[in-house]
Amino acid sequence: MYAIIESGGKQFRVEEGGKIRVEKLVAEVGGEVVIDKVLMLGGGSFAVGAPYIENAKVTAEVVDHGRGEKIIVFKKRRRQDSRRTQGHRQDYTTLQIKSITA
């Protein structure tokens, strides 16, 4: 069984035992997170929400928190002697999917 969930404005396809990287959540490492924004369930039974499925949830364990790779943002206006460089690193949380309930 798999589910499509929404977290941090993005959608993820998850299965039990799998790991995903979502935008940083306020939770302690080793703690449990319940995601109730389930868009679709698939596998044995098939269900599509409008927009979410009622009484469906995904339970996950927080594995760790981290920061992604550095991205360089470079802006230049031609012939204006104007340029700007900026770096960015996105914070993330790694989740281990424990169960999917409908």
Image (cartoon, rainbow, N blue to C red):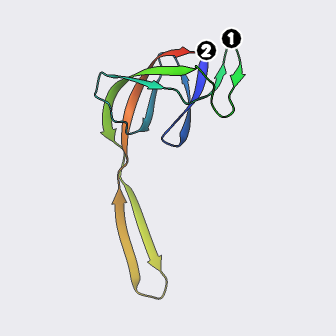
Q: Is residue 38 left or right of residue 66?
A: right
Percent from the top left, x then y, of residue 6? 54, 35
Residue visible at 53% across and 16% down in the picture: 100
Q: In which quarter of the image is the C terminus?
A: top right
Q: Is residue 78 left or right of residue 65?
A: right
Mark linked to residue 101: none
Percent from the top left, x then y, of residue 90? 37, 48
Q: Say which label, 2 or 1, has the lower sequence index.
A: 2
Closer to us: 69 or 36: 36
Location of residue 53 with respect to 7 vertically, above or below: above
Q: Total marks drawn?
A: 2
Q: Name the residue under label 2.
A: 1
Q: In which quarter of the image is the N terminus?
A: top right
Closer to us: 2 or 75: 2
Location of residue 86 with respect to 91 vertically, above or below: below
- The residue type indicated by label 2 comes to Met
Q: Dot 1: what SS?
A: loop
State how far apart marks 2 and 1 are (Cα). Answer: 6 Å
Q: Name the residue under label 1.
A: 44
Percent from the top left, x then y, of residue 32? 36, 21
Q: In this view, does 62 lie to the left or right of 18?
A: left
User: Are the residues tagged 2 and 1 within 8 Å (C-beta)?
Assistant: yes
Residue visible at 64% across and 21% down in the picture: 41
- The residue type indicated by label 1 comes to Gly
Q: Residues within 10 Å of mark 1 (few under 14, many from 20)?
A: few
Percent from the top left, x then y, of residue 67? 32, 43
Q: In this view, does 20 lie to the left or right of 45?
A: left
Q: Which residue lies furthest to the front in this view?
A: 54
